[in-house]
Amino acid sequence: MKVEIWSDVACPWCYIGKRRIETALDQFEQRDQIEVIWRSYQLDPQAPRISDKTVNAILAQKYGMSEQQAAAANQRVSSLAAAEGLDYHMDHARYGNSFDAHRLIHLAAAHQLQDAMEERFFKAYFTEGLALGETETLVKLATEIGLNEDEVRGVLASDAYANEVRADIQRARRLGIQGVPFFAIDEKYGVSGAQPAEVLKDVLEQAWTEAHPLIQVSSASQDAGFCDDDSCSIS
């Protein structure tokens, strides 16, 4: 079964959603038969590579609120993140464009390191206050998870994986996805938002049951109360 997750590494709810789907999968009996694929999405594709604006200022501008209100909203999100074991420092987050980070997530996928890259970028942005629009920062983070530095620099100096990022975003639009995180299970079930782990687990189980219906085979010659080599009937 395939679980696709559309997210942006600059989305605080996406990091929370990552932890919650991990919790759900840890509790899912068929975990080893689930393939998780991260898909690219950009909340602000027009953002500059690097900006001196704070996340609070950007949020205030986007939703027409004061910076104090934005800070309070970010604090509420940080409290929810803490409940998932995440340490947010939104006041230190470095706002910027996430397109190159997404390209490196696709590179990491080619080396079976996609989840590790996603995790490292989330932590860098929300906990460590690193700017994901800076080339040297991206190189440092990518090599930390095991990617080759020359290959990483080559990707960043070119348009490699740009089409893959755009394709993810275009597919999200075709599916009607309007926000992230968004979880798509075998393209049949969709879950929008960082839903609780219990909700995600219920959807996983429903999708699994639908894809693997129980087929009961019985023997016409089996008498009540009789046991053969395979089963016993109840009299």
Image (spheres, rainbow, N blue to C red):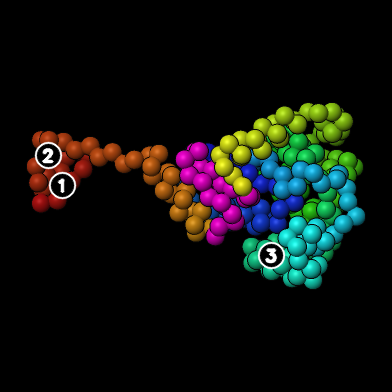
Query: Badge 1 is on which residue?
Result: 233
Query: Badge 3 is on which residue?
Result: 77
- Residue 70 horizontal/vertical position (percent): 76, 66
SS of the residue at dot 1?
Answer: loop
How many numbered marks have been drawn onto this rendered protein structure?
3
SS of the residue at dot 3?
Answer: helix
Amino acid type at mark 3: Val
Find residue 44 and name its label.
Answer: none
First in residue order: circle 1 vs circle 2: 2
Whether residue 146 is visible to the viewer of this picture, yes or no, is: no
Q: Which image quadrant is residue 111 in?
A: top right
Amino acid type at mark 2: Gln
First in residue order: circle 1 vs circle 3: 3
**For residue 226, above or below residue 200:** above
First in residue order: circle 3 vs circle 2: 3
**Magenta region: which residues?**
179-196
Task: Please state which of the two labelled residues, at mark 1 or mark 3, is closer to the viewer.
Answer: 3
Q: Is residue 197 magenta?
A: no
Which residue is at 84% across, 28% downward? 158
| Labelled pair 1, 2 in contact (Cβ < 8 Å) | yes
SS of the residue at dot 2?
Answer: loop
- Residue 155 horizontal/vertical position (percent): 82, 31
Left or right: where does residue 221 sit relative to residue 89? left
Q: Residues within 10 Å of mark 3 (few under 14, many from 20)?
A: some
Which residue is at 66% across, 46% downward? 7
Mark 1 to mark 3: distance in Å?
Answer: 55 Å
**For residue 122, above or below residue 185:** below
Query: Badge 2 is on which residue?
Result: 222
Mark 3 to mark 2: distance in Å?
Answer: 60 Å
- Residue 95 horizontal/vertical position (percent): 83, 53
